[in-house]
Image (cartoon, rainbow, N blue to C red):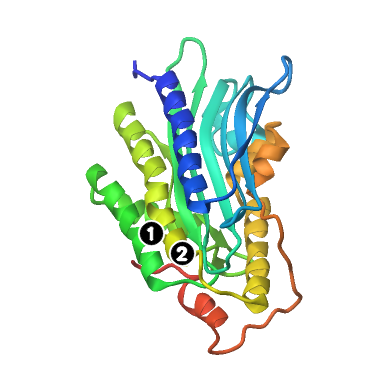
Amino acid sequence: MTSINKQAVKQFLLDLQDSICQQLELADGQAKFEEDAWQREPGEKLGGGGRSRIMTQGKVFEQGGVNFSHVEGRQMPASATAHRPELAGRRFEAMGVSLVMHPNNPYVPTSHANVRFFIAEKEGEEPIWWFGGGFDLTPFYPFEEDCQHWHDVSKQLCAPFGDEVYPEHKAWCDKYFYLPHREETRGVGGLFFDDLNHWEFEKCFDYIKAVGQGYTQAYIPIVERRKDTPFGERERQFQLYRRGRYVEFNLVYDRGTLFGLQSGGRTESILMSMPPLARWEYNYQIEDGSPEADLYQNYLKPRQW
């Protein structure tokens, strides 16, 4: 039988949430995360609890959240069993840290990261388990060196686990964070993976640790480089317009959002990824040769870094 240490995973995730929050608070220099600890009432459809931490009106970050949750249920939601029929009839636990940071300055990219563990159990049978996660970057006014740094960190943390890991998980990220109705990627990608259980448990767990800890190594140097860049109303309005893409993806395509809502998860925590402000404009046109056009022409399609 596979040796699975659920408690070790949970402790790592709690410590990771603490570490990421501390580093982002230092990068902001003003705002602090406010914690909203929550627990499900007995008898609810989905049991468990978590710690939602939200930062608002910071010097660098307009709004962001770093959430930990550990939920369990007696029955998988339909969205999950449709793809994995072997999960039907199993009780399950899902735990993870998920975060999204929306900066004030349009020259600082939005970032997202997630690491999670899932296990479904049934008496007398081997457990079904896997890890998933990754991180991705969504710039509005991209800089080549920033995007290269983001992917260099991704390559470095993947390297100890095999030469094939970065190319596979980079390509998976490009494919996953894609808006078919817009024919564009959400940003410049990074890493994405799911159903990770083809290595032994400890190696999979080590990879999750590397990804979770790699997020701030990839993101904070970019924040430091761009947070004081002057900007005006034009850049702000473009940032709000592009944030609309974030909303579209999360509400239409994101599997984590759908799983959370369909399984009876905590709505406030699930939707903390939304930006505080966004806008939509009918038939928005990009001016040829503009900085905004550079984003569309050179960054919103998969490329090799």
Which residue is situated farthest in the top direction here?
124
Which residue: 71% across, 31% down?
Answer: 264
* In this rendering, position of residue 251 left or right of residue 173: right
Q: Mark 1: which secondary structure?
A: helix
The quadrant in which the C terminus is found is bottom left
Q: Tell me the kind of residue under disc 1.
A: Trp
Judging by the rendered image, the residue that carries numbered circle 2 is: 188
Q: Where in the figure is residue 76, as x and y percent of width and height?
A: 62, 28
CA neighbours of label 1 inside 10 A, class few (<14), some (14 to 19), many (20+): many
Give the distance between the C-alpha atoms of the residues marked 2 and 1, in whole angstroms: 9 Å
Residue at image point 68% right, 73% down: 237
Count of residue discs: 2
Residue topped by disc 1: 150
User: Are discs 2 and 1 less than 8 Å apart at CB?
Assistant: yes
Q: Where is residue 193 in the image (x, y as percent from the top left)?
A: 43, 45
Residue 215 percent coordinates (x, y): 42, 48
